[in-house]
Image: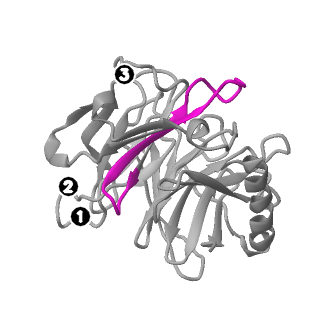
């Protein structure tokens, strides 16, 4: 019953926001539209947006108040690999050098296949000051000895609390017994070294959304973003059976609400971030902007 009420609330909230969503236009990714070059993770820091594509192709845009976002540069990340899905981008809280214009960028590998025997890695990259490339400064690995996660694990930084959250399926999106796990760690510092291994006993929290709340869902999950203690999860493929919805999980109260944006796009949502009083959503169609809902 509680989940039905939550979904009803999402519909009401969607009615207030559908006509406020603005499609800003397409993105200018490398070989965009071709198989293997799909858009994936994205995050914004200040006036700069880091947009990633599958394998770790990076594009940097400058976000302007008038809705324009000119492309500044494009390059392959230091972690570029055929098994790097670059599914979530999340800026950290440290800079590799104090003079750098951007803090380090955390890139979720989020692929079913391992790289050098390890999977679900989090690549921490320094974006070069002239935006011509990046340097891999740290790799974070969750030693999942308990098999907490199934298909893939995504990572997101909570910059206000300096925490690192993992989120993912226990099985996969197609299994009716699939559940969704959240695990919380202290955010590793760059001084912790070039390779950091996180273990289950290091976790500050480890729980299933379905076990701590009455909410039930099984979406196609994409990006992650934390703002004011809430985890924003854009989902869906823009299809009636897999609609584009942004689920919002309250990390403290452990309750769910949602923004149903299925009428806004027939494309696939990928990642979400914030600048000022707006959220920006990266999708396969391009870039969307909407006011932050109350």
Ranked by sequence position, the earlier of labels 3 and 2 is 2
Mark 2 secondary-structure assignment: loop
User: What's the CA distance linking mark 3 and mark 2?
Assistant: 25 Å
Q: Which residues are magenta?
A: 157-181
Q: Is residue 198 left or right of residue 172?
A: left
Ranked by sequence position, the earlier of labels 3 and 1 is 1
- Dot label at residue 96: 2
**How many neighbours does mark 3 have within 10 angstroms: few (below 14), some (14-19), or many (20 or more)?**
few
**How many neighbours does mark 1 have within 10 angstroms: few (below 14), some (14-19), or many (20 or more)?**
some
Q: Is residue 175 above or below residue 233?
A: above
User: Residue at horizontal 54%, vertical 77%?
Assistant: 277
Q: Which colouring convention does the figure follow?
A: one colour
Tell me where residue 77 appears, x and y as whole percent.
Answer: 37, 44
Tag 3 residue: 118
Tag 1 residue: 100
Mark 1 secondary-structure assignment: loop
User: Residue at horizontal 85%, vertical 45%?
Assistant: 240
Tell me where residue 245 appears, x and y as whole percent.
Answer: 71, 53
Mark 3 secondary-structure assignment: loop
Q: Is residue 146 above or below residue 71?
A: above
Q: Is residue 262 left or right of residue 149?
A: right
């Amino acid at each position: 019953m509680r989940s039905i009420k939550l979904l009803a609330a999402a519909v009401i909230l969607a009615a207030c926001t559908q006509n406020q969503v603005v499609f800003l236009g397409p993105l200018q990714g490398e070989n965009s539209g071709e198989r293997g070059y799909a858009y994936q993770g994205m995050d914004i820091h200040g006036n700069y947006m880091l947009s990633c594509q599958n394998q770790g192709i990076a594009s940097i845009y400058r976000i302007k108040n008038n809705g324009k976002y000119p492309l500044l540069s494009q390059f392959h990340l230091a972690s570029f690999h055929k098994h790097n899905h670059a599914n979530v981008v999340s800026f950290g809280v440290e800079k590799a050098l104090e003079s750098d214009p951007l803090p380090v960028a955390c890139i979720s590998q989020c692929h079913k296949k391992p790289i050098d025997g390890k999977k679900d890695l989090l690549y921490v990259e320094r974006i070069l000051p002239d935006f011509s490339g990046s340097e891999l400064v740290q790799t974070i690995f969750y030693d999942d000895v308990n098999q907490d996660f199934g298909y893939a694990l995504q990572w997101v930084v909570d910059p206000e609390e300096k925490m690192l959250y993992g989120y993912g399926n226990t099985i996969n999106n197609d299994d009716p017994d699939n559940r969704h796990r959240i695990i919380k760690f202290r955010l590793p510092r760059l001084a912790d070294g070039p390779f950091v291994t996180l273990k289950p006993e290091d976790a500050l929290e480890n729980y299933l959304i379905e076990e701590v709340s009455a909410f039930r869902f099984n979406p196609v999950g994409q990006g992650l973003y934390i703002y004011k203690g809430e985890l924003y999860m854009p989902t869906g493929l823009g299809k009636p059976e897999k609609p584009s919805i942004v689920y919002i999980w309250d990390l403290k109260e452990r309750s769910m609400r949602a923004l149903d944006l299925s009428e806004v796009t027939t494309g696939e949502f990928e990642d979400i971030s914030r600048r000022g009083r707006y959220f920006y959503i990266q999708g396969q169609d391009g870039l969307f902007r909407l006011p932050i809902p109350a």
